[in-house]
Image (spheres, helix red, strand yellow):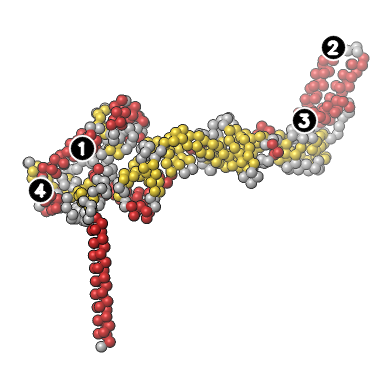
Amino acid sequence: MRKALGIACIIVLVAVSFLAGRWHQKTHLDGTSSAQAGRKVLYYVDPMNPGFRSDKPGVAPCGMPLEAVYAGGSTDPSRMPPGTVNVTTEQQQLIGVKVATVEKSSWSHTIRVVGRVVPDETRIYRINSASDGWVKTVLPVTVGSLVRKDEMIATFYSPEFFPAIKAYLYALRQLDRFEASGTETQGQIDLTNANIDSYRISLLNLGMSEHQIEEMKSTRQGVDNIEIRAPGAGFITARNISIGQRFERGAELYRIADLSRVWVLADVFENESEYFQPGITARVILPDKRREFLAKVSMSLPQFDPASRTMKVRLEVDNPGFFLRPDMFVDVDLPVALPSTISVPVDAVRYSGLKTTVFIDRGHGFFEPREVETGWRFGNRVEIVRGLMPGERIVVSGNFLIDSESRMRSAAEGIRGVAQKDPVCGMDVDEVDARAAGRVSDYDGRKYFFCSDACKRQFDKDPGHVLKKSPAMGRPGTITAMKTSPALDAGVQQDPVCGMKVERDQAEAAGRTSAYRGKNYYFCSDACKEKFAKDPGRYASKQEETHLVNHAAGGGSND
């Protein structure tokens, strides 16, 4: 008894659920119908092939239900380029679609790159030993110490100096004797002065400073230890000696860098290096100390760094107060003023391999994919060289899902063929529309189609010049053939109603063929055959027109 009661409850529950579902479905359909009752249905389209239209609802050749197109709420999708998608207002809000108007205006941007401070190579002094010796004294100056010019920093002993010192002093004393006696000729005095200069140069080459040589000249006394003096003012960056150390000829004893003027090596990407022209002024910023310095780009050629894939641009900076130290990292700012051009947000552009696409708002929720050519890219803006005109509205946010839907739609519409390209502006052009409007020109044995009369007039003025610069016609200087629908082989025909490819053998076996004016036509379904039978003249002329278009564009024709 209890088991039978449980089964009865389950049956009642299932029945109630079924009735509730039917009531909800009826309510939803009634609401939809009432919302659309005031709108006139223009026609029905295949959701996977917008080129297929029907006057009555039903099932599309792809097997999906036909979708209604209402008056005042949509645009004819068959007249739009391949890949155009329709997104309702609710869907746009859900995926965050934002639309902006394209404008042409000037643009300014500040390029900020990272730089590293290095000493000016022309202001580095290396003190190397010109003879063997031993270090006698070292003054308390270490790496980082600031020294003045001719300041003594160490002394050393070397027996190689003694012959040169004695010869120098002997020549000086001989000159003194000549001047005291007054009996020597002018030639003897000149020879003695030449000997003094020669011995002086020998001492300089051995490593004695000018200061010590002048001291011996004034005192006429020799020295045992040779002084090491700073050749210029700067900071000691290397110290390689200590008291009692023995060194050999050529050893580096000290290195001194003058930091009153330094270099900054900025890492600049290749596409930005063209703006760092020699002589241009930039700003060098120490972020932590909030100090700025003016720098000039040097005349030296930028070096390419294969590790970081950047160009090393050298800037010269005055360094008062020595705030810039070697190996510091700084920010380099270069203001760039760009001419008036069309630029859009980076998020508005979709990159897919060799194609760069933006989506145009065609109204009523339709978005057309359009291939564009880009130029510079700074921050969140990118230049559009070709493909857009001021005043058009484009999607600047939420275009990821639109792009995905467009690619699927383009794949489904592949049977419609490839749209022609306007050689002037690069936009997609419906070939049939262009022919109907007379926007066709012949040049060099080929036909070209245009989106507007203005583009046609511009092309007719100088076709060769337009084709040379047109991105739609191939690389500069090359004229490529217009793209057309691929010709069907002998075993494949085209359904004159929906445009789909049909295997001739399969259509004949299924009885889906019709003869009209001495020509056989083949169909993918019985529905297409019935529609053809109602008005064969309409569909036959449509197919004939397609063949003529393909033949004129170089695609050939077939029976």
Q: Is label 2 in a helix, a strand or a loop?
A: helix
Residue 186 tag number? 2
Give the number of the mark in front: 4 or 3.
Answer: 4
Q: Nearer the viewer's eye, disc 1 or disc 2?
A: 1
- C-alpha span from label 4 to label 1: 27 Å
Q: Is 259 situated above or below 509?
A: above
Dot 4, crowdedness within 10 Å: few (<14), some or many (≥20)? few
Q: Earlier in the sequence, mark 2 or mark 3?
A: 2
> Where's residue 229, x and y in %?
78, 34
Whole-angstrom CA distance, mark 1 to mark 3, is 90 Å
Q: Amino acid at mark 3?
A: Leu
Q: Secondary structure at mark 3?
A: helix
Pointer 4 residue:
534
Q: Earlier in the sequence, mark 4 or mark 3?
A: 3
> CA–CA distance between discs 4 and 3?
113 Å
| Of callouts 1 and 2, the N-terminal one | 2
